[in-house]
Amino acid sequence: MLSRTADHLFWMARYTERAENTARMLDVNYQASLLPQSDAVALKGWQSLLSISELLPTYKAAHGEINIHDVMNFMIKDESNPSSIVSCLSAARENARAVRGTLTTEVWETLNQTWLEVKRMIKSGEYEHDPSQFFEWVKFRSHLSRGVTVGTMLMDEALHFMRLGTFLERADNTARLVDVKFHGVKSDFFGATNEKNQDYDFYHWSAILRSVSAFEVYRKVYRDVIKPERVAELLILRADMPRSLHASLNEVVNNLAMIANDQSGETHRRAGKLCSELKYGRIDEILATGLHAYLTQFLDRVNDLGAHISKDFLVPVSA
């Protein structure tokens, strides 16, 4: 496959996944903002959302003080923000248009219709009347896109590059979510929790789980009250949790194997090594050495993996 075609397919999938993850985070923060809490706690949640995407300096340069209305607009419809939902869906559509002949009609029509519909919703201000319904729509369109892709595309290199982009992006976003959200907890989540913080902690951990569609999964796997260390284990080490780091890296390794070329051996080795560490890792060891340090290193390695994938298969990034 031509590297330019592979590049468009890879980034089409990454941007679609990024739009979904942005919608998930916005929805969780919006729902949390409706709960009884101080203004300081509410604003800290919106600040952490910007930190996850490394957009806090950019936002402050454009808007100054953090407030819900400006953050929502910045992350939903601001085309100058490359990680906004509109920007991501636009980039996904443009990458799809560039390789229209490689995609099935169903895949192209799904992405194109998503873009046309989101433009209409933004122009009419429809999302402002019920933000949660809008976020659910974005997630649904992403699910639909993946389903149509798997259900109609030939199982060749084109599909593998799309899957590679999806799961590399998912690993990156889940790691950022866990890092920022765990770092933002006020109570000592590895020890006893003060009684007055119990309600806050329950909603905090529930929100994290719901943001990755893992609340029901947690109940099924652990059948217990929500405990921070188990939330971390579920989202990092469980291979059967679809949005976990381990599950994402399994998919990255499998799809890299399917598109391997003469120069990709080192990339596959690095991905396999990272995946094996997740497979045989223990959450108590990760927590003992420091969750933030572990996830920071993980993100560095995922970014390095993305750079090697680009070098081996995609259009080289101009200096």
Image: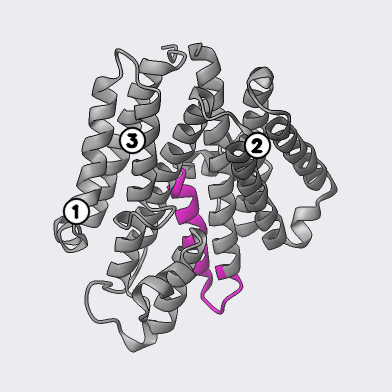
Residue 41 located within the stretch drawn in magenta: yes
Q: Which residue does the numbered mark 3 point to in the structure image?
A: 253
Disc 1/disc 3 C-alpha distance (Å)? 17 Å
Contact (Cβ within 8 Å) of mark 2 with mark 1: no
Q: What span is colored magenta in the figure?
A: 32-53
Which circle, 2 or 3, is nearer the viewer?
Answer: 3
Predominant secondary structure in magenta? helix
Q: Which amino acid does label 2 sit on?
A: Leu
Disc 2/disc 1 C-alpha distance (Å)? 35 Å
Q: What residue type is labelled 3?
A: Val
Labelled disc at residue 89? 2
Q: x and y percent of residue 287 in the render?
A: 20, 61
Front residue of this view, candidates 237 and 119: 237
Q: Residues within 10 Å of mark 1 (few under 14, many from 20)?
A: some
First-in-chain label (2 vs 1):
2
Q: Residue furthest bottom?
A: 195
- The secondary element bearing badge 3 is classed as helix
Q: x and y percent of residue 53 in the render?
A: 47, 44
Q: Quadrant of residue 27?
A: bottom right
Residue pictured at 50% horizontal, 14% vertical: 1
Disc 2/disc 3 C-alpha distance (Å)? 26 Å
Residue pictured at 38% horizontal, 83% vertical: 198
Q: Which residue does the numbered mark 1 point to in the structure image?
A: 281
Q: Is residue 52 left or right of residue 86?
A: left
Q: x and y percent of residue 174 in the render?
A: 41, 50
Does residue 77 appear in this view?
yes
Q: In this view, does 75 lie to the left or right of 222?
A: right
